[in-house]
Image: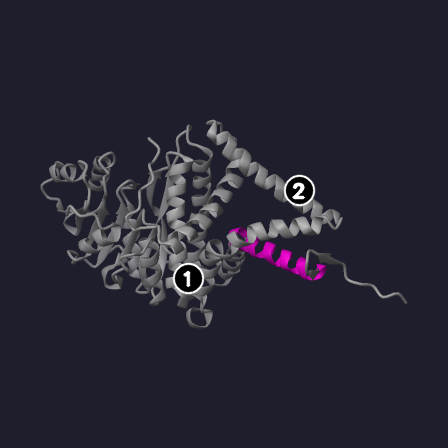
Amino acid sequence: MPIRHTPRFTFGVSYPLRMVEIVFWSGLALIFYAYLGYGLVLWTFLHFKRLFKPVIQPYSDALPEVSFIVCAYNEEDWILRKLDNSIAINYPRHLIQFCFVTDGSDDRSTELVRTYPYPPDLRWCLLHQPERRGKIAAFQRAMQQIESPVVISTDANTLVNPEAIHRLVRHFADPQVGAVAGEKRISMADKDDASSAGEGIYWKYESLLKKWDAELWSVVGAAGELFAFRTECYEPVPPDTLVEDFYLTMRIAQRGWRVQYEPGAWAAEASSASVAEEMKRKIRIAAGGLQAVWRLAPLLNPLRYGVLSFQYISHRVLRWTIAPLLLPILLTINILLAIQGNIFYQILLLAQTLFYLAALAGWFLEQRKLKVKALFVPYYFCLMNWAMYAGFMRLILGRQSVLWEKAKRAAE
């Protein structure tokens, strides 16, 4: 009986074909899981969980005193809208204090906050110092003034709905809840580019995952546009932290509290003015995400943190580390497998090629101010993963400062 040999690649060193295939399918499964599979696992698990244990969220009508903090750096184009929006929030005036921090601003932001016609019964304060030390330092200066049991944090260039605070604070009826993440929404005009549309699609999916994460146990980090936390849960954030909102709320979860999610409290912001502006933001977030993975390394231990580790690895770590690294590797392996003559791998290579060509076409058309909705997803997907590489380089070279240049937003 003739002996059959396993086919081998010969590129200087021989690699068994079967081993290459295992690497390919394992990598493909990891990428699928990181972006879509985790959502399917969550949906399936929660679907069965609800059959045996209906979701009962403990809410309270009690209204705690809250502090509403807005950190603004050179936001003269937005600050009046933010002030109008903040004052219009439906919450008892005697239970809320507004704190606006304009450290480092050298435009009219500070003067506009100081001279705003506040209602006589409104409690507010303005903190300003000429030196710019970043949002973390500004926020921590504000926290030194806080005496209320609950803090609401929101960005200066976002608008929140009138019922936001009511919706957020009701979750604190559950003694396990240490923080509550609001929903981020992207306001898009018809003229917005493909990356902006992709950003909106991405955040809709992210909002759904946050809702499911919260139902399972805890949201994996809140977005800085709008979130609340118990003052007793707060601990100072290291001054060189790049994504302070994520790190702050993950440390709360790491210490045993739950981070809940409230889609009824939302903050809307305009999409980025251009792809270049969106890339500024994405690269900074990517660098900050990788920094957070390093600093929150103990959370990678499921034996200690259980479900939270599972959520953190599945929802964040894989997307920020392994998935971007695997994309070029899988394309290379797919080419090697396809040239062996296997029609199935040739079809997969064609699918990958078409996907990346669609992303390239999305970029090409965006440069010419043309929009094709079918190209939004591949274009934004590639944009996010390219930002991870750029963010990694900035992080290891020490080029990403906390005094980051903010991305310009599209005009509404």
At mark 1, the secondary structure is: loop
Residue 200's place in the image compared with 341, above or below, is above
Q: Is residue 219 in view from this perspective?
A: no
Read off the residue under disc 1. Answer: 217
Quadrant assignment, res 294: bottom left
- Relative horizontal placement of residue 58, taking residue 132 as reference (left or right): right
Task: Tell me the crowding category of disc 1: few under 14, some 14 to 19, or many 20 or more residues within 10 angstroms, Cα based.
Answer: some
Furthest-left residue in this view: 120
Q: Is residue 121 in view from this perspective?
A: yes
Q: How many marks?
A: 2
Determine the CA span between mark 1 and mark 2.
40 Å
Using the image as rendered, state which of residue 37 and residue 375 is in the foreground.
375
x%, y% of residue 63? 22, 54
Tag shown at residue 81: none
Give the residue at x 48% y 46%. 386
Q: Mainly helix, strand or loop, the magenta region?
A: helix
- Give the colour scheme of this rendering: one colour
If the image is split into quadrants, where does the C terminus sit?
Answer: top left
- Relative horizontal placement of residue 411, taking residue 1 as reference (left or right): left
Using the image as rendered, state which of residue 285 and residue 119 is in the foreground.
285
Read off the residue under disc 2. Answer: 350
At mark 2, the secondary structure is: helix
State which mark lies toward you, 1 or 2: 2
Give the residue at x 66% y 48%. 335
The span picked out in magenta is 16-36
Residue 136's place in the image compared with 112, above or below, is below
Task: Tell me the crowding category of disc 2: few under 14, some 14 to 19, or many 20 or more residues within 10 angstroms, Cα based.
Answer: some
Furthest-right residue in this view: 1
Residue 300's place in the image compared with 372, above or below, is below
**Which amino acid does the dot numbered 2 rest on?**
Leu
- Relative horizontal placement of residue 141, taking residue 287 as reference (left or right): left
Using the image as rendered, state which of residue 8 and residue 345 is in the foreground.
8
